[in-house]
Image (spheres, rainbow, N blue to C red):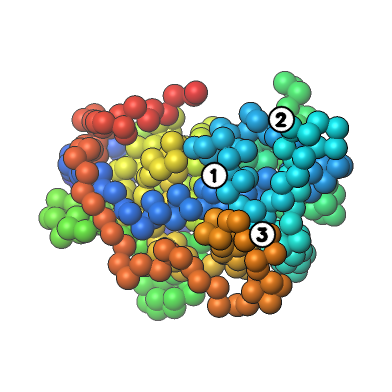
Amino acid sequence: MIFKDKSFLLLPQRLTSHAQFELQQWRGITKVRLKWVKNKSLDHIIDTETDLKAACLLKDAIKRSHTEFLTAKSFAEWQKLLGLTVPVLRFMRRYPTLFEEFPHARYANLPCFRLTDTARLLDSQEQSIHQSHENDTVERLCRVLMMMRSRTVPIQSLHSLKWDLGLPDNFEKVLVPKYPDHFRFVKNSNGVVSLRLVQWHEEFAVSALQRSNEIREMGNEYRQFKRGQTALAFPMNFPRGYGAQKKVKAWMEEFQKLPYISPYEDSRHIDPSSELMEKRAVGVLHEFLSLTIHKKTKRNYLRSLREELNIPHKFTRLFTRYPGIFYLSLKCKTTTVTLKEGYKRGKLVNPHPLARPREKFYHVMRTGLLYRGKGVNFLSQQDILLNDMNNEGKGEEEEEEEIDEREIVTDDECYAETSELENESDEEE
């Protein structure tokens, strides 16, 4: 990365005046050619958790039904909504330990599905964790709203993100009304209902990157950052071989030296085309992914919040431009972005309490798939309550990475993507 004037790197970290912002509005030119690298370990996690998420959403849909079951006709059009690559009926029949099939009382040829006792037990464990960690959920939801320009998020966007953010299924009914000093519903001029933050919570306005550096007790380096004398670096985990490349190393060193702008700080006075704004956008995406339970989400969900988050229109380029921070996957016919530091050897580094019942849920799914035909009572309650479940395929000794021939040029003036990535534009679908 080439900078005409590096004097701005010495400016205080916590920018408080318009003049300080204006001094840093310079856009450098970077030309570092990288190849897209396939991470088999993360792709496997995305593949398995896509099925897990779909099963959990179907479980919640059955619970919401006043009949406590769903007919095959009612979910026939849900395949794309659930992110599945197979019809929903076939998917539900795969997992008899969760979904019990029976004929409709009036229409014998109409398949119906209700929850098994095993699924109900797993759900009760999940609801118990939601209740015991409600304060954490409220804080996480506040942080999401605090990152938004208007401190509001459409309810529909939150519904898409509720599984990723660990929100209860009916959060707008059981969670939001309990905290009127934190949230309230508003209706926009276009009739869209949104959730708004009632008041700013300064104690929440500390990013995950700031907290992790403080917890690690980095001594003099972190104290210098707090005084505004140094930048705050993002953890980097480059694909194999990239970290040793001189051009990549020099580029990342210059990027890390740029001042870190918290995603909770006002960014209106930063030049949208500056390197500083790009690092701020990386910080916003880093923080948002840090707030998710599995440190990943779909690109389309981020797209719906792009303007509120004040990130570039073509923000997908940030994921491919910084492969040491993010991993972009094309598994399951969608685009998923993962925070790489959230995983080590195929497992979450700091798993949220909700991750545990989800692991059990997936274990029961796999058991039902492997032992179909032995009935829904194959698993006992003791099996479900055991703490040492096998995490099939999730603990590889090493994260496998495979160089792909899809070449990426990490420069906005000279940026090229080929093959599938070229077709994954940031235009509205």
Query: Of callouts 3 and 1, which one flags the residue occurring earlier in the amino acid sequence?
Result: 1
Q: Tell which residue pokes out farthest to the left in this image.
A: 246
The answer to whether residue 72 of the structure is visible from this angle is yes
Q: Which residue is mark 1?
A: 266
**Residue type, label 2:** Lys
Q: Which residue is mark 2?
A: 73
Residue 424 badge: none
| N-terminal label among 2 and 1 | 2
User: What whole-number distance in Å separates the C-alpha atoms at marks 3 and 2?
Assistant: 24 Å
| Residue type at numbered disc 3 | Gly
Q: Is the Cβ of the residue at disc 2 closer than 8 Å to that at disc 1?
A: no
Pick whichever, 238 or 100, lies toward us.
Answer: 100
Q: Which residue is mark 3?
A: 375
In the rendered image of this protein, does residue 4 appear above or below residue 208? above
Q: Residue at x 30, y 29 (%)?
A: 422
Q: Is residue 54 visible?
A: no
Residue 87 percent location from the top left of the image: 56, 35
Question: For residue 223, what is the image quadrant?
Answer: bottom left
Which mark sits nearer the N-terminus, 3 or 2?
2
Q: Is residue 297 left or right of residue 318?
A: right
Residue 158: quarter of image: top right
Crowding at dot 2, Cα within 10 Å, few <14 / some 14-19 / many 20+, comes out as few
Residue 130: x %, y % from top left:
73, 62
Alpha-carbon distance for marks 2 and 1? 49 Å
Q: Nearer the viewer, residue 429 or 234?
A: 429
